[in-house]
Image: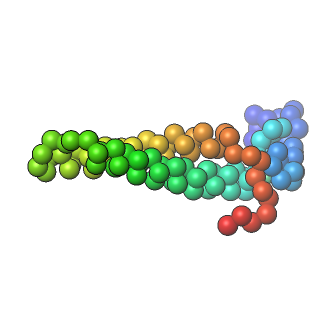
Amino acid sequence: MPSRAGWPTEAPCIDCGNRTEGLLLGERCPMCQVRRERRASRLAGRIALGAAVLMAGYLALRPLPGGTSGRVYAGVAILITYLLVRKIAAVIAIQMLPPGHTGTTE
Ligand SMILES: [Zn+2]
């Protein structure tokens, strides 16, 4: 990385503390970053599933336009809820997750 010349190019990862070349202060090493994204993605998937179930329950309780179109709208609404909540929850989770357990949490 030529643009980082003059800066310390080896800082400790804020999660695991390993010094990695090219890392800046306050950053995570690639391993921790990947691990964190995976955890956030799993968490977001669970939250999104819960939100989709809630949406399905809400739609089941309220009157829908009859026939096939009502079911199509309900399906689309549930799908959109799942995708949106998953996306938003993943972004928030990456920021909010506590510093990773460096051990295996799988
Ligand atoms: Zn790390």
The x and y percentages for residue 15 are: 80, 49
Q: Looking at the image, is 105 positioned above or below residue 26?
A: below
Report whether 31 appears left or right of 8. Answer: left
Residue depicted at 52% across the width and 54% down the height: 46
**Nearest the eye: 53 or 92:** 53
Task: Give the x, y percent position of residue 53.
Answer: 40, 52
Q: Colour scheme in the image?
A: rainbow
Q: Nearer the viewer, residue 31 or 73?
A: 73
Answer yes or no: is residue 79 visible: no
Drawn side of residue 90 relative to residue 105, left or right: left
The one of 64 and 5 positioned closer to us in this rendering? 64
Locate residue 89 relative to residue 83 in the image: left or right: right
Residue farthest toward the front in the current orientation of the protein: 61
Where is residue 105, by image quadrant? Answer: bottom right
User: 50 and 85: which one is in front?
Assistant: 50
Total count of labels? 0
Q: State the residue at coordinates (34%, 49%).
A: 56
Residue depicted at 57% across the width and 56% down the height: 42
Q: In this view, does 18 lie to the left or right of 76?
A: right
Residue 35 location in percent, x, y? 68, 56
Q: Is residue 99 visible?
A: yes
Query: Going by the picture, which residue comes out furthest to the left?
Result: 67
- x then y, percent, for residue 41: 57, 52
Q: Which residue is drawn at 41% across and 47% down?
A: 54
The quadrant of the picture occupied by the C terminus is: bottom right
Quadrant that contains the N terminus: top right
| For residue 65, above or below residue 100 | above
